[in-house]
Amino acid sequence: MSLAKTLSHEIVFAIGVIAVHESIHYLMALRNGYEPIFGIKIQESAWLLREPIPYVAIFDEYVSRNENVTQLIAPLVVIDMVALLFTIPIFPSIFAFYAKIALVVNTAGSSGDIYNTVNILKFPKNTKFLNVVDDGISTYYSVPYSPDGAVE
């Protein structure tokens, strides 16, 4: 039996975890009143391989700092919490096996979300962010002007 056939269930499951991860980003953006879009960016990675990177983005709408953070971190919290629940010994071992795959795939896939969350949290609370498309996706930010110079 080939390795690809042996791992096919796990590979399909991992792709499913990625789809659920991006769907949570999408649902959080909808919940916050935005019009998100799904996309796939092709990125060159190690050894000149072209890697598809799925994403959810909000374009041409100002998004607050806190809304950005909740939209970014939600998949990590939701999927990892559910996966950890299924590692409890009351569930069959196959649940724990797939839960561990979900934990690894989701947490690794969340690394960019964590990085962006940490950077966004460095800005004042009243900062607004705007994603635009030019040669790629660019994000701009602005802190609303306050006559007394106060920043939240």
Image: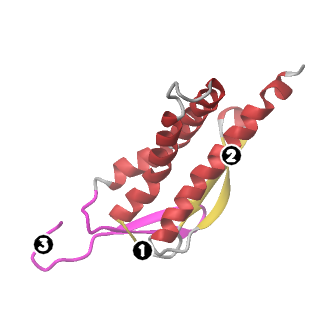
Query: Looking at the image, how many numbered discs can be counted on the residues?
Result: 3
Q: Residue at x 51, y 41 (%)?
A: 82
Nearest the viewer among 48 and 128 is 128
Q: Where are the magenta residues, as a range?
A: 123-152
Q: Residues within 10 Å of mark 3 (few under 14, many from 20)?
A: few
Q: Residue furthest top?
A: 1
Label 1 neighbourhood size at 10 Å, few (<14), some (14-19), many (20+)?
A: some
Residue 149: mark in rendering: 3
Looking at numbered disc 1 in the image, what kind of residue is underneath it? Tyr
23 up-or-down from 44: above or below? below
**Which is more N-terminal, label 1 or label 3?**
1
Task: Please say if 28 is above or below 7.
Answer: below
Residue wearing tag 1: 62
Residue that numbered label 2 is attached to = 16
Kindly state the secondary structure of the residue where label 1 is placed.
loop
- Residue at the spot 56% in from the left edge and 69% down from the top edge: 36
Amino acid type assigned to the residue bearing label 3 in the image: Gly
Farthest residue toward the left? 148
- Is label 3 or label 1 in front? 1
Marks 3 and 2, Cα distance to the nearest angstrom? 48 Å
Measured in 3D between alpha carbons, the distance from the residue under mark 2 to the one under mark 1, in whole angstroms, is 30 Å
Q: Nearer the viewer, mark 3 or mark 2?
A: 2
Residue 113 is left or right of residue 96, and the answer is: left
Residue 37, x across and y down, in percent: 61, 67
Q: Nearer the viewer, mark 2 or mark 1?
A: 2
In terms of sequence position, does the residue under pointer 2 or pointer 1 come before the other?
A: 2
| Vertical placement of residue 119 versus 1, above or below | below
Q: Measuring 66% from the left and 27% from the top, which residue is drawn there?
A: 94
